[in-house]
Image (cartoon, grey):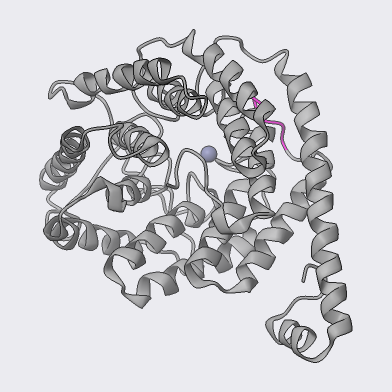
Amino acid sequence: LLFSYNSQNYKIQTQNSKKKTTSLICKIDAFQKKVQSKITDLLQQMEEGLKTADPHDFSTYTGWSGIALLYLQLYRATQEAPHLQRALDYVKRALRNLNGRRVSFLCGDAGPLAVGAVVHHHLKNQTESQECLTKLLQLQRSVLSPDSDIPDELLYGRAGYLYALLYVSKEIGPDAVDEATIAKVVTAVLESGKNLSKEEKKAERCPLLYEWHKKQYLGAAHGLAGIYYMLMQPSAKVSQDTLNELLRPSVDYVRHKKFRSGNYPSSLSNETDRLVHWCHGAPGVLHMLIMTHKVFKDEKYLRDAAECGEVIWQRGLLRKGYGLCHGTAGNGYALLSLYHATQDKKYLYRACKFAEWCLDYGTHGCRIPDRPYSLFEGMAGAIHYLSDVIQPEGSCFPAFEL
Ligand SMILES: [Zn+2]
């Protein structure tokens, strides 16, 4: 599969020759073993490197709760208790450093609180888990406050708080967060989008418009794709009317911004076709398109997502390195999502090729990120990806997919 794949070839191999099928299984087996041993190796490097990391960075994006999230993933994949214990150690470190400045899962207090609630839940520490949930829910006051200047995007804004609520509901159960709170946050995001759209006189073309630092971004981290993706989550329970009248035309507006290459601009004011990242460009927009296809069952969205997949396959190995936000692992997750949506093994093969590239960690002359061991910029993200690629059916981009 990994070394000689094309769809025709694959069929012939599996149908006609038992011998070849056996050799194929051997290759898959060898690949899984290689990935597994690399995970062990990188985990050691990461632990060593984290000794000099910023002790106060509690964030999911670059700090301790991101590392806790990695260990939760390893626990999920292996059911080995020491991973859960590590997740607890790291999330405790994060929880000691909350600063009340931000509300999102990736960069604010909601991340450690949500991860803390889930880790304690797995350990059956009900009191501690509930304590985290209570604090998480208290953040809604500033999220919903009409005179707050909180943005709506995923990294720092309301969509990032919404993710935290949906994440704990999924991991702990529907009773973890009351539906009314989710509805209030969803409404706040919708209202904000409607207001800006009216202000900019775009109510017809793009009824939900958002900006961050005065720029109307399109990508998953700061822009429309990430916000629409979160609003379309089934667990966000947005009404069918709102989906039809507000979200669908807004998604179509983003679709029409596509470059001829199939990639997407980073913002509405940027015409350069340069970035192919989860944060900016096709790899983030792909997730929005797949979700739109799920919601509206219109094949054109899946075709557009497949086009994003081609851009990623052509241009998705990044000099910026191996991470999730603007690295190869993040782009690999887009291919895994496309595999889930289509069941086409071509995408799984491509995701494995991206993983293979990550196996040669540090040998491609990539720029070294500021937080080289973190979940979103560095090594922890690549390990997360490697552990998902060998169990692809349940793979999930952390702090983003649900
Ligand atoms: Zn990025």
**Residue 114 showing in the rendered view:** yes
Please state the horizontal and vertical placement of residue 94, each as a whole percent of the image. 52, 15
Residue shown at the point (67%, 49%) measured from the top left: 318
Residue shown at the point (17%, 43%) measured from the top left: 190
Identity of the residue furthest to the bottom in this view? 16
Question: What secondary structure is the magenta-colored segment mainly?
Answer: loop
Q: Is 196 above or below relative to 127?
A: below
Residue shown at the point (81%, 58%) measured from the top left: 31
Res. 130 image quadrant:
top left
Which part of the image, by quadrant, shows the N terminus?
Answer: bottom right
Q: Is residue 182 left or right of residue 45?
A: left
Q: Is residue 66 left or right of residue 238?
A: right
Please state the horizontal and vertical placement of residue 3, each as a whole percent of the image. 82, 70
Tell me the magenta residue range.
Answer: 367-373
Query: In this orientation, which residue lies closer to the viewer: 29 or 149?
Result: 29
Query: In this orientation, which residue lies closer to the viewer: 356 or 312?
Result: 356
Residue 358 drawn in magenta: no
Please state the horizontal and vertical placement of residue 103, each as a whole percent of the image. 34, 23
Res. 185 image quadrant:
top left
Residue shown at the point (71%, 86%) measured from the top left: 11
